[in-house]
Amino acid sequence: MSATTAERLTWDEICARYPDEWVLLADPDLDDWLDVSTAVLAFHTPDPVEAARRADVAPFRDQALLFTGQDPTGDFVYIL
């Protein structure tokens, strides 16, 4: 788990670099379906508890916390 630099990436680039991890995204651009198209990667980790903790104290006005892998249970709920 680590913080990253302020590079804007596409969602596909984020998923390729950080597979099966939780990513905290700052300033996300959304497409017409409200999916993230690009964002600044602020943090990534495989640990969902750590991801939620970081998102709770993140200083970003606009942010998204997403998982880059497949949800094997179908139980994920996304709140923007």
Image: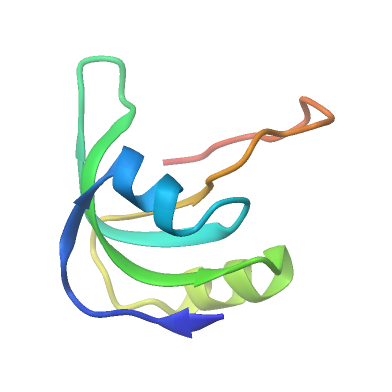
**On the picture, is 29 further left or further right than 50?**
left
Seen in the picture, residue 18 relative to 45 is either above or below; the reply is: above
Q: Residue 51: horizontal and vertical position, in percent? A: 59, 69
In the orientation shown, which residue stands out farthest toward the front? 16
Q: Residue 11: horizontal and vertical position, in percent? A: 32, 41
User: What residue appears at the point 80 percent right and 31 percent down from the top-left corner?
Assistant: 72
Q: How is the image coloured?
A: rainbow
Q: Residue 45: horizontal and vertical position, in percent? A: 58, 70
In the orientation shown, which residue stands out farthest toward the right? 73
Question: Total marks drawn?
Answer: 0
The answer to which of 25 and 16 lies nearer the viewer is 16
**On the picture, is 12 further left or further right than 15?**
left
Q: Quadrant of the N terminus?
A: bottom right
Seen in the picture, residue 59 relative to 36 is either above or below; the reply is: below
Seen in the picture, residue 64 relative to 44 is either above or below; the reply is: above
**On the picture, is 1 further left or further right than 5?**
right
The answer to which of 12 and 40 lies nearer the viewer is 12
The answer to which of 64 and 69 lies nearer the viewer is 69
Q: Residue 70: horizontal and vertical position, in percent? A: 66, 34
When asked about the image quadrant of residue 35, the answer is top left
Q: Quadrant of the C terminus?
A: top left
When asked about the image quadrant of residue 74, the answer is top right
User: What residue appears at the point 30 percent right and 78 percent down from the top-left corner?
Assistant: 59
User: What residue appears at the point 31 percent right and 64 percent down from the top-left corner?
Assistant: 41
